[in-house]
Image (cartoon, rainbow, N blue to C red):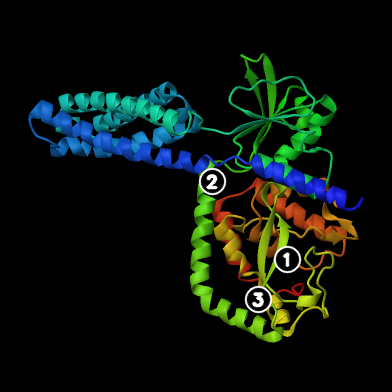
Amino acid sequence: MNRATPRLLDAVRHQSVESRLVPSLERRRLRAYAMMLLTDGALFHFSFALAALIWEGVWAEGRAMITAQVMLPAYFTIALYNGSYGVRALGSWTFASRKALTALVISAALINFVGFYTKSNDDFSRGVVTLGLLLAAVLVVAIRRVVAVIIAARWGGRVSNRLVIDDGGSSFAFAGAERISAAEYNLDPGSHDPFMLDRLGKLLRNQDQVVVSCPRERREDWAFLLKCAGVYGEIVSEPAHKLGAVGVHRYDALDRTTLVVSTGPLGLRARILKRAFDVAVALVGLVVLLPLLLVIAVLVKLEDGGPMLFIQRRLGRGNQFFDMFKFRSMREEKLDHDGNRSASRDDDRITRIGAFIRRTSIDELPQLLNVLKGDMSIVGPRPHALGSRANNKYFWDIDRQYWQRHCLKPGLTGLAQVRGHRGATEHEKDLTDRLQSDLEYIAGWSLTRDIGIVLRTAMVLRHKNAF
């Protein structure tokens, strides 16, 4: 009975956490940004077409439309970098209007500067250009006001998810933020319990800003967890150097100061690029490899009549659990769902077809489905099973930074793998070598590096440690 109680409590907490999950606003925001971009482009053309009609009596006169088309790329470039299409712009139409007008004025000045030096200014009507710019300015501001009304009506005025975690620190009444008690969910920042970290990861899912209020002695642990979760996190007040603070945020209305201790490893543009790359590669891979996948699935089934896929719980982004797919390579009655025993050469659990697909890494291909689901990326730190050990120690007991590798989605392949760090982890160095590569990858992510790792992966599909 005593053994069942912790499991029951954990199940209750899990249900409680699931009820607190918040929907992601990122997709909504991306759709809003796209609509604003398209609308701005249409308004630009409309403004100059109308200006030509008013000034010269010709709708969409050629020179006027050329002016709009030349100016628009400059406007978009400046607007994308000055925050015209950002979260703050969605939350404040006045801020959005100021930024859009700034981009409009600078782009007009740039085009005029180029026209002056190329001596092409005389080819365009100053009256049409001036009137077109004025009309564009009015319409761009008007559309920002319309967007604000739509957001207020459909989104309840909320453009970001904010969470305050109260762990016994000073009061922090953050308007518009959800508030939870660390004690209520048994959140201990100093713990290495993966189930606790999974609960925390679920609570932080889809949060755009997380503020933790806790006693001084727990701030360093909370700062570390927020970095591991890959979220934008703040700690209410104090010693910046120990927490690894990257900025300071003052809330004048609350008379409180927070230290920004984590921002997530990738910005919005980087996340969009990485996700687009993942989806493109996964779709192409599934289409090209479909005949091979079907043949392997049939061979696995024919070997002993067991299931074709092996589904194992692994640690993913934000230290949350997810179900990872692999072709089953071991006998059904000897499957190791927790990963307590690493595969070894001449392992008696591995089937004949299993030995082949493990040597060639074909058993990993079903993870392309995990990539499409969004649980994994094509490139990232490889996900580990809960029972994984090195020198008979859990990975997180060897190096606390192990949790930090989970601030990005796990990958089908990774920098550690192309460097040859594969196979069983018999010694602590086997883990620390992989961890060093994973943290290096996270710190220096780029799309070109992902492409390079994918190309290098083809060279190490067969490896002496793959068994």
Q: Mark 1 points at which residue?
A: 420
Which is more N-terminal, label 3 or label 2?
2
Q: How far apart are marks 2 and 1 (CA)?
A: 27 Å
Q: Let me know if residue 129 appears in the view.
A: yes
- Tell me what residue is drawn at x 69 percent, y 21 percent: 172
Given residues 40 and 113, the one toward you in this image is 40
Residue 289 horizontal/vertical position (percent): 53, 74
Between label 2 and label 3, give the one nearer the viewer. 3
- The residue to which callout 3 is attached is 308
Left or right position of 269 against 411: left
Label 3: how many Cα within 10 Å (few below 14, some 14–19, many 20+)? some
Work out whether mark 3 precedes mark 1 in sequence or the reverse, and give the earlier one: 3
Q: Is residue 28 left or right of residue 171?
A: left
Q: Quadrant of residue 185?
A: top right
309 or 368: nearer the eye? 309
Task: Give amino acid for label 2.
Answer: Ala
Read off the residue under disc 2: 270
Quadrant in which residue 389 is drawn: bottom right
Q: Residue at x 49, y 67 (%)?
A: 284
